[in-house]
Image (cartoon, helix red, strand yellow):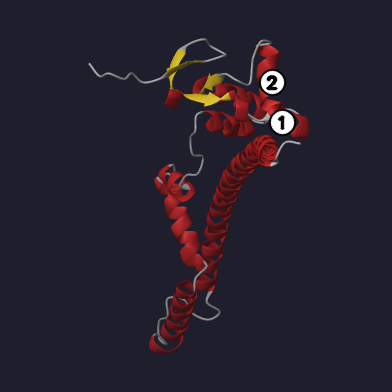
């Protein structure tokens, strides 16, 4: 058994005994957040401590209240961001991989066809096939061409190609729009959390600097008093 035991603290909110690493001093909690906690616990004092579990809960309530005052009723996306702040979770994720994992075989084929149909490779291949078709039916098969001029069969093939290509491109475009919306929601979620975290950090720093400034002023007053006392002692009595 060790001679010294770890120092414990009592949480002013839940009343549970916590170690030093599990509590946060109420003296440096931001004033707005402290007032919110004090509404539920009127006897709360700045001298005590609060456990991180209760602090996270009130912090989430404070952020939610701030958002509601600025934006009105929160959306499901904003609720998710507030919850992630409480649980200290990250909201960023690989949107591209998540989107690709939910695609069906037909959707993947449509995307590949749309990508190929909008490339120079398709244009050059199409021109090559068109040129060969015309040469074969105009020069090589003069006696019995399978598609004589004015190339009715070629027109039919091109019409069918255009008829199938348009829906495939539209399906791929619709999925691209859905992917863009998913990316926009993800960016909004990340930016909102960053904004809230930075705002809370600034409030925390402002309160900390204010408290430190008051402490420095008190120390300065004590130093002035000590200097005055020393001056009086050095001055010979009349």
Q: Is residue 221 above or below residue 103?
A: above
Where does the image place residue 157, in percent across and percent down from the top left? 50, 67
Q: Quadrant of the N terminus?
A: top left
Give the residue number, with chain letter if any, for mark 2.
Answer: 36
Q: Is 217 left or right of 197, judged from the image as shown? A: right
Where does the image place residue 118, in percent across and percent down from the top left? 52, 67
Give the residue number, with chain letter if any, for mark 1.
Answer: 66
Q: Residues within 10 Å of mark 1 (few under 14, many from 20)?
A: few
Q: How many marks?
A: 2
Q: Residues within 10 Å of mark 2 (few under 14, many from 20)?
A: some
Label disc, if present, on residue 126 of the rendered structure:
none
Q: Is 61 left or right of 110, judged from the image as shown? A: right
Q: Is residue 34 above or below residue 175?
A: above
Q: Is 231 left or right of 172, judged from the image as shown? A: right
Q: Quadrant of the C terminus?
A: top right
Q: Is 146 left or right of 234, judged from the image as shown? A: left
Q: Is residue 45 above or below residue 183?
A: above
Q: Secondary structure at mark 1?
A: helix
Foreground label between 2 and 1: 2
Q: Secondary structure at mark 2?
A: helix
Residue lying at 50% horizontally and 66% vertically, measured from the top left: 117
């Amino acid at each position: 058994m060790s001679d010294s035991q770890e120092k414990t603290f009592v949480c002013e909110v839940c009343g549970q005994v916590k170690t030093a690493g599990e509590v946060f001093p109420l003296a440096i909690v931001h004033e707005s957040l402290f007032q919110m906690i004090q509404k539920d616990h009127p006897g709360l004092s700045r001298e005590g401590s609060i456990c991180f579990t209760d602090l996270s809960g009130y912090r989430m309530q404070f952020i939610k209240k701030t958002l509601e005052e600025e934006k009105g009723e929160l959306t499901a996306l904003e609720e998710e961001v507030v919850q992630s702040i409480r649980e200290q979770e990250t909201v960023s994720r690989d949107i591209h991989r998540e989107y690709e994992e939910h695609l069906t075989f037909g959707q993947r084929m449509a995307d590949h066809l749309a990508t190929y149909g909008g490339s120079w490779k398709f244009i050059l291949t199409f021109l090559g096939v068109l040129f060969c078709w015309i040469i074969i039916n105009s020069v090589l098969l003069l006696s019995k061409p399978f598609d004589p001029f004015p190339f009715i069969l070629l027109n039919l093939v091109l019409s069918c190609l255009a008829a199938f290509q348009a829906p495939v491109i539209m399906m791929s475009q619709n999925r691209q729009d859905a992917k863009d919306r998913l990316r926009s929601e993800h960016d909004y979620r990340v930016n909102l959390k960053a904004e809230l975290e930075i705002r809370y950090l600034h409030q925390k720093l402002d309160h900390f600097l204010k408290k430190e400034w008051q402490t420095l002023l008190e120390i300065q007053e004590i130093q002035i008093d000590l200097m005055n006392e020393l001056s009086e002692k050095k001055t010979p009595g009349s």
